[in-house]
Amino acid sequence: MEENTPDGKQDPPILDLIQEIKDGRLNFSSLDKEGKIRCIQLLLDGGQTVPQIAQFLKRSDRQIQRYKEVIQKINARIFGPKFSAQFAGDTVAKEEFSHNFLIRLLMNKEVKVADKIKAIAVALQHRIELGKWLQSMGYLPSQPQKIVGDLFHHKGKPLPPPAINILPVAVKLKKDIEND
């Protein structure tokens, strides 16, 4: 599958480029800057170190380190409310996918009951941890919500009369006072 670039051209898949470099059919220096960056980023994401990439691409460690710094600038994000919401949403979606995948695996009749119980416990623990993480990010309340309010009188609007509870003892006392 080819990738579309901003100018509408089709770029070959990055894995194909790396395979061609590995096979000697393509020289790394013949790639444009974007192609070089894509190759180096994929190799870095794959766990390769700067010296390993330099050796593979027949370049200096310093040159690969400069590309790595460019990649870090490209990947830099501004952390704010929008990013937090997107990241939280993405994390919840991935957890949901993982949870559903685990549940589908549990439906397999070949899975032992003990393993199913362990898997359910793991799935529940993941949900609990996700909830705690969402609380720490401020997306879920960390304690029951309280309603706090102040009462005040608005001018022009009379307050309702207070409720008066008349106890039978009070009535008896009133009669005793009248009789005296």
Image (cartoon, rainbow, N blue to C red):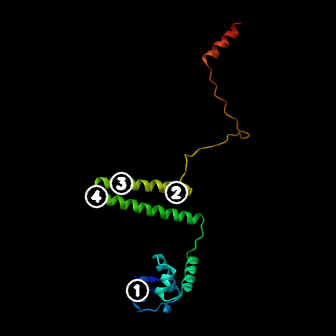
First in sequence: mark 1 vs mark 3: 1
Closer to the chain start, of discs 4 and 2, is 4
Q: Residue furthest top?
A: 180
Mark 1 element type:
helix
Kindly tell me whether residue 9 is visible in this rendering. no
User: Which numbered disc flags the more N-terminal residue, 4 or 1?
Assistant: 1
- Disc on res. 8: none
The foreground one among 1 and 71 is 71
Q: Position of residue 65 (x, y in %)?
A: 56, 82
What separation in Å lies between label 1 and label 3 (alpha carbons)? 41 Å
Locate residue 62, reporting x and y percent.
Answer: 57, 85
Q: Give the Cα distance between marks 2 and 1.
A: 41 Å
Query: 142 or 171: which is nearer to us?
Result: 142
User: What is the spatial separation of the Cα atoms under label 3 and label 2, in whole angstroms?
Assistant: 24 Å
- Where is mark 2, residue-wise? 134
User: Could you tell me which secondary element the residue under label 3 belongs to?
Assistant: helix
Left or right of residue 111, residue 123 in this image: right
Q: Residue at x 42, y 60 (%)?
A: 96
Q: Residue furthest right?
A: 155
Task: State which mark lies toward you, 2 or 1.
Answer: 1
Disc number at residue 111? 4
